[in-house]
Amino acid sequence: QVQLVESGGGLVQVGGSLRLSCVASGSLDGVNVMRWYRQAPGRQREWVAVIGADGRTNYAYSVRGRFTIARDNAKHTIYLQMNSLKREDTAVYYCQLTQSGIHEYWGQGTQVTVSS
């Protein structure tokens, strides 16, 4: 089993920045790909960013150039640096881990609210 705990959410003004963290614990053997998703009120959960075990990254078009995903394998942690935040970035942000291409785990989410 793997546990994921997100932190770093909060209230920020348009144009501001936040950094989210997600700490993984438990049985972390195998190749792990980690992702950030978000879900705004009344909308489906959407993928935001991914980072592979080799450090390669990819981003949803809506956040490309503004968000950066990174991982610290020694700390079993991934980060999401969010800059130039917009109101439409308001959502609950979730961390997700895919282990060995088979098992999926989710965190409980952290709220990000961007106000004008």
Image: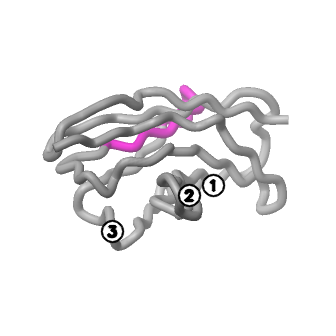
Disc 3 designates what residue? Answer: 62
Judge by depth and name the residue closer to the eye, 63 or 99.
Answer: 63
Q: Mark 2 vs mark 3: which is more N-terminal?
A: 2
Q: Locate residue 31 relative to residue 69 in the image: left or right.
A: right
Residue 77, percent from left and from top: 53, 33
Circle 1 crowding by C-alpha within 10 Å: few under 14, some 14–19, many from 20: some
Q: Identify the residue at horizontal 64%, vertical 48% (top origin).
A: 96
Q: Identify the residue at horizontal 85%, vertical 35% (top origin).
A: 1
The reply to whether the magenta stretch includes residue 73 is: yes
User: Residue 22's quadrant in the figure?
Assistant: top right
Q: Identify the residue at horizontal 23%, vertical 41% (top origin).
A: 115
Task: Determine the CA span between mark 2 and mark 1.
Answer: 5 Å
Rendered image: mark on residue 52: 2
Compared to 35, does 72 lie above or below?
Answer: above
The residue at the far front in this view is 42
Task: Determine the CA span between mark 3 and mark 1.
Answer: 21 Å
Circle 3 crowding by C-alpha within 10 Å: few under 14, some 14–19, many from 20: few
* SS assignment for the magenta stretch, majority: strand
Mark 1, secondary structure of its residue: strand
Residue 116, percent from left and from top: 16, 44
Circle 2 crowding by C-alpha within 10 Å: few under 14, some 14–19, many from 20: some
Compared to 49, does 70 lie above or below?
Answer: above
Q: Mark 2 vs mark 1: which is more N-terminal?
A: 1
Rendered image: mark on residue 33: 1
Mark 3, secondary structure of its residue: loop
Q: Amino acid at mark 1?
A: Val
**What range is drawn magenta here?**
72-81
Task: Mark 2 and mark 1 in contact? Answer it, CB < 8 Å.
Answer: yes
